[in-house]
Image (cartoon, helix red, strand yellow):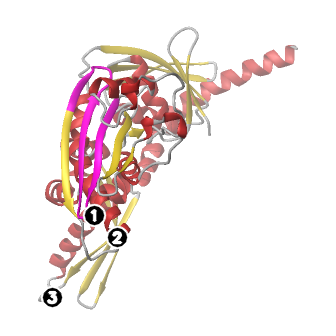
């Protein structure tokens, strides 16, 4: 028994001493390693040598590599559909200012091949600056939990007198229509969280008005409340005589019981394609145009300004070394919107304690921290019995 207590005491002392020594002696090596880690995008730039001017070709190659690096980052950040949906904004507003968003770069290799000068560049994009740029043109969802959307959009084929709308018989588990599938996929591309009605249809008695094809705003919001949605999108997607596709949508804020926006779009069906193929492709194009316009409007409407400054103590468990602690500290400072400062307060019981000052709601901060996509490593976030939270490193 005495040996166990003594062994536990020694382990705690060694942890405190190790962290204190490591945090001072390894700061320089950690920073050097971090600089190496930052060069996570590799690209090759090419410049033509004209009239023997190698220096100018080299400058062109570097410039091309930096732009390509930003394009590569954007493709990874936004995905294929995000790039397609916002191509005009990207080439007109984001990429021309690409160099401003580069935190640092390093020339790793260079070679002249005939009249071409090629350079291999490793670079790091300033993610905070890029997020601000993307947010300014409506391409990035707000910080915090994703907005939950419930779709109440019918698909109508007037010529065949066919009407598809799941809420007419919510217990029937009717399959998703092509219009619903397109809406799900495109809103997910923008970072929203479409609710899966097939997985969780609330049980209960629904009024006859809630089962009507053309829902009133009041009844649509009732459905949103049943599903705990933030936003309800209701309306119809109509195929008109297999010649055109029309979509009309209304966006409702469930909590505020207000209309956020209304939008519509109509596209002619290309007769050169096969019957079903041309209808589905035109439907996707039509819905895509509406989603591109509506997404930033929904985001802006759901962003309530927060001005209250709060503090919370975080006990970080499982940290292996100072570099790992520094990564997590910098992630909170730069990666979570509203964080003003992160200050280390003490090392106790194999845990490192920090005091975080942030703007906004504590519950929202905790949820954002636990579900953030850019965490440097996997963690588990729990509330401490005595107040504050515990972050346990899972690796």
Among the two numbered marks 3 and 2 on one chain, the one whose residue lies closer to the N terminus: 3
Front position among marks 1 and 3: 1
Instruction: Estimate the x, y position of residue 161 in percent, counting from the top left.
Output: 34, 52
Image side of residue 116 versus residue 162, left or right? left
Q: For the C terminus, which image quadrant? A: top right
Front position among marks 3 and 2: 2
Boundaries of the magenta span:
231-260
Disc 3 packing (10 Å; few <14; some 14–19; many ≥20): few
Query: Looking at this rendering, what residue extends furthest in the left direction?
Result: 51
Q: Is residue 314 visible?
A: yes
Among the two numbered marks 1 and 2 on one chain, the one whose residue lies closer to the N terminus: 1
Q: Is residue 73 visible?
A: no
Q: Is residue 165 above or below residue 35?
A: above
Residue closer to the observer: 39 or 134 = 134
Residue at screen point 22% across, 28% down: 259
Residue at screen point 26% across, 19% down: 306
The residue tagged 2 is 275
The CA span between labels 3 and 2 is 58 Å
The answer to the question of whether label 1 and label 2 lie on touching residues, with beta carbons closer than 8 A, is yes
Image side of residue 369 versus residue 318, left or right? left
The residue tagged 3 is 52
Q: Is residue 309 above or below residue 223?
A: above
Residue closer to the observer: 25 or 82 = 82
Query: Looking at this rendering, what residue extends furthest in the top direction?
Result: 386
């Amino acid at each position: 028994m005495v040996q166990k207590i003594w062994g536990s005491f020694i382990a705690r002392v060694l942890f405190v001493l190790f962290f204190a020594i490591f945090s001072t002696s390894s700061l320089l090596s950690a920073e050097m390693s971090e600089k190496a880690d930052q060069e996570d995008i590799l690209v090759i730039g090419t410049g033509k040598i004209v009239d023997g001017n190698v220096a100018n070709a080299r400058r062109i190659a570097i410039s091309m590599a930096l732009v390509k690096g930003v394009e590569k980052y954007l493709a990874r950040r936004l995905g294929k559909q995000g790039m397609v949906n916002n191509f005009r904004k990207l080439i007109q507003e984001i990429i021309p200012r690409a160099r401003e968003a580069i935190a640092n770069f390093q020339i790793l290799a260079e070679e002249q091949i005939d009249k071409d000068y090629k350079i291999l560049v490793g670079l790091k994009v300033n993610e905070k600056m890029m997020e601000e740029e993307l947010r300014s043109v409506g391409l990035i969802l707000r910080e915090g939990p994703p907005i939950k959307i419930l779709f109440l959009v019918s698909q109508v084929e007037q010529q065949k007198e066919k009407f598809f709308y799941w809420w007419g018989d919510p217990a029937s588990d009717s399959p998703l229509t092509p219009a619903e599938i397109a809406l799900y996929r495109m809103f997910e591309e923008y970072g929203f969280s479409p609710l899966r009605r097939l997985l969780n249809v609330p049980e209960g008695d629904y009024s006859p008005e809630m089962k009507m094809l053309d829902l009133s705003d009041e009844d649509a919001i009732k459905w949103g409340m049943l599903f705990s949605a933030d936003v309800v999108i209701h309306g119809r997607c109509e195929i008109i005589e297999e010649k055109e596709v029309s979509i009309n949508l209304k966006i409702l804020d469930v909590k505020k019981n207000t209309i956020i926006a209304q939008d519509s779009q109509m596209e002619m069906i290309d007769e050169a394609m096969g019957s079903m193929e041309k209808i589905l492709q035109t439907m996707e194009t039509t819905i895509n145009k509406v989603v591109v316009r509506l997404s930033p409007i929904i985001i802006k409407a759901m962003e309530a300004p927060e001005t209250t400054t709060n503090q919370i103590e975080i006990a970080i468990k499982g940290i292996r070394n100072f570099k790992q602690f520094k990564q997590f500290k910098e992630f909170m400072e730069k990666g979570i919107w509203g964080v003003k400062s992160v200050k280390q307060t003490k090392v106790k019981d194999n845990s490192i304690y920090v005091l975080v000052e942030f703007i906004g709601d504590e519950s929202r901060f905790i949820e954002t921290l636990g579900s953030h996509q850019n965490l440097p490593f996997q963690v588990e976030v729990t509330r401490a019995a005595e107040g504050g939270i515990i972050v346990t490193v899972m690796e």
